Every structure is written in C-alpha cells, then in structure tokens.
Image (spheres, grey):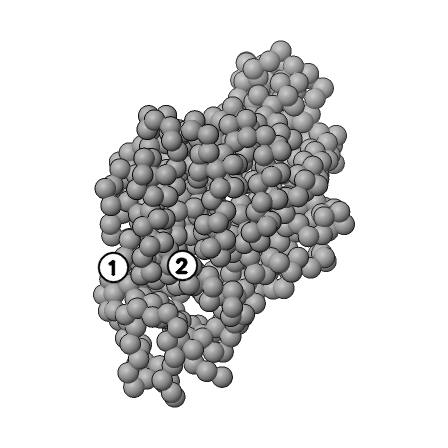
C-alpha cells in the first residue's frame, strides 16, 4: 500500500450532509436554491450535529445534467450566487463548526467548455479522446461526431454532451491510435488541470472534494491500476500542499479507491458485491411502482425479511480489511442519483431502524438532505436537467425542494409554484423541519440524538471496534465491547438468544425487549444499550 500522510484528524469524526444546492433553500425568490439560502439554514445543520457539508456541482454549466456538465471550473454558476457568495458561505459555515466540500467532476466537461470547443476545432489538441473517421465514414462504437471543424468523433463519458477528458488508455492498440498512453501530452495536461482546479478552491477555504465518477479517468483499465496511479499522484500533491483537505470518492469500492489515495469512499452506492442495493428496500420506475426485477436477497432492509445483513457484513468486512488504517468508508442514506430511503408508505416505518444502524456502524455517515425528516421519493416528475435515465428511473424524484415548514412552497422559496426548480412533494402529510422540530418524538429529533450519542461516544464512532453477533434478523452487534445494537428492519417480530449477564441500560430503544438472555425485536424495532464495562 502506498504511504500517504495520515488523514486529517477531523475526518474521523465527520458527519457528512449532502446538499443539492438548487433544491435546498432559495434566498432571492427565483425558484432555485442558492448559496445565501444555504447560509440562512446553517443553524439547522449545526443543531442537527452535522459538521461536514458536500455541495453538488455549483460551477458554471449549461445544466443539461444538473451541473455535472461543467463549462468553467473556476467560477460558480450565477444562479447560485458569486464566487464571493460561496466564500461567505464557507466562512459562515466555519463559524458553525461546519466544513464545506465541493463536487469535482474530474473525468469529463460540458461540450460547451472552452477546452472542448478549442479541441473540436484543432486536430492537434489532445485534451479529449478523438478518433479519426473511417474510410467509409464510420466512427468507433460509443463515439460522437465532431461538432466543430475537426474531423472524426469524440468519446463521451455519460451523456453525449459530456466529452471525456483524455487521461490515456491502460492498453494501447496500434489499430486504434486514439488510445494514447498515460504519459502523453493530453493526459499530462489534464492531470495538471485537476491540480490547478483543486488548488484554486482549497486556497479559498474549501475543505476538499467529493469526486464524481472517480474510477472513470483512464480508459480500458479493468482493474483500475492506472486510474489509481493518477489519484496516488494527486494525493501526494495534496498531502504536500493542502494536508488538511480530503478527497471523498464516488467509486463504490473502498478497497480500491482508498489505497489509491482517497481519504474515504462511499459504500453501497454502486459497485462491489452488493451493487449498491443493500441499504435500499424498494426501487421505483418512472411511474413510481415497485420494480420487482431486483434480487431481494441483495436488500438488507427488505421489510418482508427476504434479505440478509450477512451480505452487507461480508462486503463491509472485505472493504474494511483492505482500507485498514489508511482511510475510511462512508455509508450514505441516499443521494441525488438514487431513490431516497423513504420510497413510499411501506418504507417510512423503517427509517428509525435504518438510522439506528447507519449512525452506530463504524463508517462515516452521510445524510442526504431531507432524509433526516423522512422526505420521500416523488414518482412521476418531468425530466429536469437530465434526470431521466431511460424508462427505468427518474432521478428528479430524489431532488425535490427541501421541506422546511407548512408555508408557501414548504418554506423553500417565495417564487410562484410554477417557477420552482422542481415541484414539491404533493402529499398533504409531507414532513417538514418545523413540524418535527416541535415534536420531540419525531424522526428529526431521533436522528439528532443519535448523532449526539455517536459524537459523545468514541466507541460508536468510526474508530470503535465492532463484533457482529447475528448477521440475520434481528441484526445484532456490539461496538467497542460495550454498546449493544439491535436492528430489525422487518415488519414482523423476531428473537435472538443472547446470554446477557446483567440487564443492559437502554440508551435509544423502540420495540426491543430483553428477557432472560433473549432479545425480542418487534417489527421495525431498534435498540442501543450500554452493557457496562
């Protein structure tokens, strides 16, 4: 394993909170969230116990893919404010004890980025991956015809308007001359550009980056060896120039990404043996109906009990052993690309158990905005900035405006309803921050108590040991040799025989009973107990 400077000390205690900025809080009444709106809501995050915020891309963009099509890495999009407004937000967050990370789209740009428009008109420019037109006018599979004077076609990363930056190919082929080596001029220029972009924003007070599609850089790199080398190079640079900054990867395989140089990686988003499904219980298509084609055995939180925590435990143990002390694994509730934890009425009851698990497991928790109040995935919304991914799934349902109160537009914006970035959840009983702040029995208060308990109890944090006693239903484990956690994501009651010498002291318990060494968990129950030393 490559030797890096140890991760900054603050990272071990991080509680991440992801903000989709256009949907969080609108300060100027244009229907789109902005930096000033986020700044006005920092009190909520500080009260909740969050200490690290990740913002989805906020750079200049034509917004055909919600900002993941960047046309200027060094300036923010005017709809969010100015660079000075972002700097003020970072400063204000710091006064609340909150660090801010930006989203770095490393592998591609918009087709409107000046780099690409120049490359599309200059056959000598190798910042992107270009293939010459075949004798019969053909182009290689997956390539898109040039929009400029340059003949041939370019390789996109995702949508056609997102041309892939050229970081080289792991395997060259003389018959395919677009497969440039990693050390060619174009790939070297792009690695230098990544350093320049990171240096710019870190110099303005940002604390690091979540890196989009971090595994996508080098092409035809099946084991990601060459892509890992790029991140290793960047990590050494970061250690030397910005040692307190962190890199959080969208890779999905911590056992690969963390040894490569990332400080932490998201687990259970995609990739790995569970392919991102273990923490989600339902999936919705564009009509919002349940998609029964998924393998239910891959789902930990299956309410009917078809799943098994054993799949999660096996995958996590493999990743944890590979990461060891070199970094961390982060466990998210959801994000802007996936269904929320609350996908419908059948999952709302599971949310407390899900949070009891997430906030007591030895990973860095990441809460997607609104999950702390149980915001639901909203089906049937129109496409917005590339949210529809074919007939299977519409990401807009996970990107609806934050629900602050029961006022107009749920307190998100003073704009007319038809000018909002996305429609609100139309449910008459949609949860709000204000209502749950006023109710100490609410999910919001429960999540806040769990974060406080985790923060005050090192054994429940990322560094505490974990012993899995039962990787079935209920899921039972002990943290730090002292704290017993019982989670039942099923709707039916279950029991587990566990020889407890003395009555454990309950810390956060709902529906879990201890009787003569037997644990009984009612449907959707959870329990956190202090066993004493």
Which structural element holds mark 1? Answer: loop
Assign the N terminus to one quadrant of the image: bottom right
- Residue named by callout 2: 447
Using the numbered discs, state the Cα–Cα distance from disc 1 to disc 2 in whole angstroms: 24 Å
Seen from the viewer's position, the closer of residues 313 and 530 is: 530
User: In the image, what residue occupies the spot 55% across and 57% down?
Assistant: 14
Which structural element holds mark 2? Answer: helix
Q: Residue 424, located in which quarter of the rendered image? A: top left
Residue 194 coordinates in the image, percent (x, y) = 68, 37
Q: Earlier in the sequence, mark 1 or mark 2?
A: 1
Compared with residue 283, is residue 168 higher up or lower down, i.e. above or below? Answer: above
Residue 279 coordinates in the image, percent (x, y) = 39, 55
- Visible residue check, residue 388: no
Q: How busy is the neighbourhood of tag 1: few (under 14 within 10 Å), some, or many (20 plus)?
A: few
Compared with residue 32, is residue 483 higher up or lower down, i.e. above or below? Answer: below
- Residue named by callout 1: 304
Q: Residue 176, located in which quarter of the rendered image? A: top right
User: In the image, what residue occupies the spot 59% across and 50% down?
Assistant: 95
Taking the image as shown, residue 230 lies to the left or right of residue 299, namely right
Residue 24 coordinates in the image, percent (x, y) = 44, 39
Q: How busy is the neighbourhood of tag 2: few (under 14 within 10 Å), some, or many (20 plus)?
A: many
């Amino acid at each position: 394993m490559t030797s890096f400077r140890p991760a900054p000390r603050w990272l071990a205690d991080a509680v991440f909170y992801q903000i989709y900025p256009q949907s969080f809080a609108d300060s100027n009444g244009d229907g789109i969230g902005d930096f000033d709106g986020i700044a006005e809501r920092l009190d909520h995050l500080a009260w909740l116990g969050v200490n690290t915020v990740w913002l989805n891309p906020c750079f200049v963009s034509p917004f055909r893919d919600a900002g993941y099509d960047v046309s200027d890495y060094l300036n923010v999009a005017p709809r969010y404010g100015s660079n000075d407004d972002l700097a003020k937000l970072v400063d204000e967050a710091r006064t609340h004890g909150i660090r801010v990370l930006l989203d770095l789209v490393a592998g591609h740009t918009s087709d409107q980025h000046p780099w690409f428009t120049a490359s599309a008109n200059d056959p000598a420019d190798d910042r992107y991956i270009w293939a010459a037109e075949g004798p019969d006018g053909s182009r290689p599979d997956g390539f898109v015809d040039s929009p400029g004077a340059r003949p041939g076609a370019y390789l996109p990363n995702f949508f056609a308007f997102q041309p892939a930056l050229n970081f080289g190919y792991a395997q060259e082929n003389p018959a395919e001359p677009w497969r440039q080596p990693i050390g060619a001029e174009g790939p070297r220029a792009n690695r230098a550009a990544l350093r320049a972009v990171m240096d710019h924003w870190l110099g303005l007070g940002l604390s690091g980056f979540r890196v989009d599609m971090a595994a996508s850089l080098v092409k035809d790199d099946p084991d990601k060896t060459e892509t890992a080398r790029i991140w290793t190079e960047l990590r050494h640079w970061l250690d030397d120039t910005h040692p307190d900054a962190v890199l959080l990867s969208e890779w999905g395989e911590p056992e690969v990404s963390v040894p490569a140089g990332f400080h932490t990686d998201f687990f259970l988003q995609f990739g790995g043996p569970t392919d991102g499904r273990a923490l989600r219980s339902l999936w919705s298509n564009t009509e919002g109906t349940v998609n029964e084609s998924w393998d239910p055995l891959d789902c930990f939180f299956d309410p009917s009990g078809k799943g098994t925590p054993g799949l999660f435990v096996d995958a996590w143990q493999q990743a944890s052993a590979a990461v060891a002390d070199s970094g961390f694994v982060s466990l998210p509730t959801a994000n802007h690309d996936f269904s929320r934890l609350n996908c419908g009425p059948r999952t709302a009851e599971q949310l407390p158990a899900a949070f009891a698990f997430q906030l007591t497991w030895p990973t860095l928790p990441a809460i997607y905005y609104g999950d702390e109040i149980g915001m639901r995935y909203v089906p049937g919304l129109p496409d917005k900035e590339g949210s529809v991914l074919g007939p299977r799934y519409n990401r807009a349902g996970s990107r609806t405006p934050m629900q602050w109160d029961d006022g107009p537009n749920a307190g998100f914006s003073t704009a007319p309803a038809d000018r909002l970035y996305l429609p609100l959840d139309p449910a008459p009983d949609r949860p709000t921050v204000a209502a749950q702040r006023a109710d100490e029995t609410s999910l919001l208060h429960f999540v806040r108590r769990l974060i406080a308990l985790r923060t005050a109890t090192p054994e429940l944090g990322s560094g505490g040991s974990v012993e899995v006693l039962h990787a079935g239903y209920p899921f039972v484990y002990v943290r730090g040799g002292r704290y017993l956690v019982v989670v039942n994501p099923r709707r039916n009651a279950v029991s587990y025989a566990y020889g407890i010498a003395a009555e454990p002291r309950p810390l956060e318990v709902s529906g879990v009973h201890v009787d003569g060494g037997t644990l009984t968990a009612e449907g959707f129950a959870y329990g956190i107990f202090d066993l004493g030393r």
